[in-house]
Image: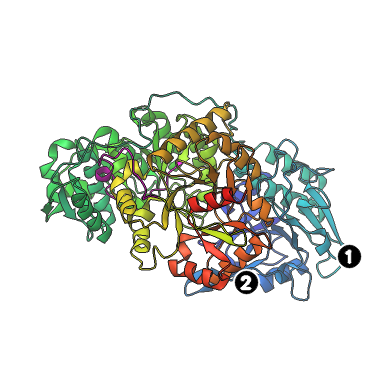
Amino acid sequence: MSFPRVAVFDERDFPTYGVSAQLTPRNLVHDLKAAGFEAELLDSTALADTSRFNAQRFAALILPQGNTFPKVAFANLRRFHQDKGSLITSGIPFTHPVIRKDGAFVDTGHEDAPARFGENGIGVGGFAGPGKTTAPATIATGDPLRLKGIVTETPLPRPAPQWLDPKSLPQGVRLIPALGDAARPLVALVVHESGPFAGAVDAWTFRLGQRDREGYESQQLVVRATVAALAQAGKLSVSETTSAFRRLDALPRPAVYSDVVLPTVPRRYSTFQPKLPPPARQLHVADIRKLTPDEKVFLFSLQGLVNRTQPRIYFLTDDDDTLWLDELQRQGATDKPLMVSDPFSLLETFKNEYRGAVVCDPKVYASPCVAVTLAGQESLLVCKTPALAKRHKLAIKTDLRGKFANNAAALRFIRTKLIAKQDPYLTCSLDPVRFDQGGLDHLIASKASVFWITGPKAAHLPGADMAAELEELRAYLAKLPLGAVVRGFWWHGDGMGLQEDDGVALGSRFGKITLVSDLITNLSVHSGVPAATLKQKPRPAPPKFDPTKVYVCFTMSDGDNLCTWRGYFRRYFEDPMRGQIPVGWGMGPTLIDLAPTWARWYYEHATENDEFICDVSGVAYIYPPSWGTALRDRDAAFRYFYGRTQEYMAKMDMNTVRLMDVDTADIAKVGPLLPQTTYLMPDYGHAGVTNYHELTYTLPTGQSVFRAATSGSGPEHFAKQIRERAGQNRPAFINAFIWNWGSKLGDLKKTLEILGDDFVAVTPSQLQALYKQSG
């Protein structure tokens, strides 16, 4: 057999859009070769070169980046298509041209024309949707991709996806559905029987839901679409087609987790996050701003070991650390510190707190994750290189060089060998390059584990294999108890890490709770400050109810991220505009465990127009639709999570919670689990609902619901959305979501000026009180 050659587009740092993070060019090449094809990775320069990429050399091109495509290669891609080359696409193809500018790739935004059949279009078709259905994504009649037994026919993810629009295909172009139906094909072959691309057979593919088999099924969809397209084009014989599908059938399949019973393990602390003992009255303080990242990680490991029994070391990494050191003294938690000019002198001062060094392996990217986990368990200092250990005359107790074949093997070691000694309720997803700013001191002090999934754009990193790493992570999460916390963050840039949505969803499936806490320092000191509860400033009475008004509550996003309270929101609070406009500030209530000094400062500096609400989804970050879906007793998982949420809302004197990634059914499910909460404020930005009475309504429990009516940023944009969502309804009650990373307090004042006197800004509690008055 002589299979045709297939090209796969691959370019480091190229933007992706609308595709699974687990769909990687390198794994596609692996599966193509397993099926019998010759396959080659080509970058944008190669695709633009007519001598390197043409229909004589390649029968098909796979574009796994989703909506984006390299504009520099578009003319040659169109020529390839005209010469009967097959385009195997993902996402909503050819809608986001990408250019290179100042050495970086730039997505220039959405365009319809490149995908269409116009004079300059590439002729893959346009899209329709999204829709509202949650009907199963069924395998089409005839099963042209032979998906039966490969793809799970499950309900579509929310929001319902876009699909190939049959109406966008001209006469002479035939559609063969593979997943979905002829009216709404999610996966399909596009057969060009006449027209400018006659003889070509293309394929649209689709991102499947976030499940254990997502990576496997996404890869299989694309490769099977390639087989089917080339068979339909007559470039594969019947026997070659049969052989290719059989080989794909034989590829290893990932484990599927369902009906999981998590271990029941005692929690050694009653708080949601481990608190350390109260700090020493006099802290040893050293400025480490000028040190290298490796030196900082080294000293953070010392800090964690020393502070485990009593917090005594505090490091200055930036001006925010100085501010909070002063605040510790002002609040009476510590006295005047002892300033240490040479931070490495602390090695001698606290020489009895550590046993030696653990050295990382530069050939395995996840090796530092093992090192940090071991450091906490074995009282070792983390040395990225043996030279660092030698410089400080440390005995190397554990040398990780050559110990692991790849990252998956390193993660397997944590799962099988280190799990017994770790805090089972605390792990952390953190890119090793961020260890110098990721709160390692508290993790080491608490004997937490650390892991990292390299990501779809990280195949170049030493030891990277995202699919194998995910297999290990799923097995690991199944071994941790209900309510275990994943600190750090799942993302470190586009394509680096598992990505936020996929990571939070994966953790949620296994009953694990994400607490965003990268870019953070000195938690081993701050967490030792005692604080059982905090009380917000007295909430003012609402303005006199006027049935002709629209009442608007601005709710600020992303306060679940601990680093926002370390410095980012402090800039907001120092803005002279603050206090002039009522704002609901989303705040992660576990701040009372990890940094009560910070929380107290904000509570003390709040005005009567500042109110703090629970952010996001509950005590920390989950997606309710994904929560506990891999578990046998999902209801018990919900009761646990919202029981802890109610507990921490009471500790922080919070009246309401922002739910994320929810629909009306999810909101109705959560309401009864929070019986002490009289109203809910769901959505991270506008979720697509346009009917006012679907945004603002009352649950059968009597709890009010104020769904977010706005997204994006900018006063004109905010005002337009608020007007549209309120419509002619009077009175009206609007939850105006504010994206913290792209908004200023002055934007809120300008928004109200644009709206006029009929729109009145209120706090969250005032919004609820006025809504109840309205009857």
Q: Give the CA distance from mark 2 to mark 1.
A: 27 Å
State the residue at coordinates (41%, 24%). Answer: 265
Q: Amino acid at mark 2?
A: Lys
Please say whether residue 605 is one of the residues in the magenta stretch.
no
| Quadrant of the image occupied by residue 110 | bottom right
260 relative to 734, above or below = above
Q: Position of residue 234 (x, y in %)?
A: 82, 54
Q: Is residue 379 left or right of residue 591?
A: left
For this rendering, which residue is in front, 85 or 292?
A: 292
Q: Is residue 265 left or right of residue 258?
A: left
| Quadrant of the image occupied by residue 191 | bottom right
For this rendering, which residue is in front, 713 or 680?
A: 680
For this rendering, which residue is in front, 177 or 734?
A: 734
Which residue was labeled with disc 2?
A: 71
Please say if the residues under marks 2 and 1 sit with CB atoms less than 8 Å apart. Answer: no
* Lower position in the chain sequence, tag 2 or tag 1: 2
Q: Main secondary structure of the magenta part?
A: loop
Start-end of magenta stretch: 514-538
Q: Position of residue 640 (x, y in %)?
A: 49, 31
Which residue was labeled with disc 1?
A: 171
Give SS at disc 2: helix
Q: Amino acid at mark 1?
A: Gln
Within-10-Å neighbours for mark 1: few <14, some 14–19, many 20+: few
Please say whether residue 529 is one of the residues in the magenta stretch.
yes
Q: Is residue 226 left or right of residue 474?
A: right
Q: Position of residue 600 (x, y in %)?
A: 30, 49
Give SS at disc 1: loop
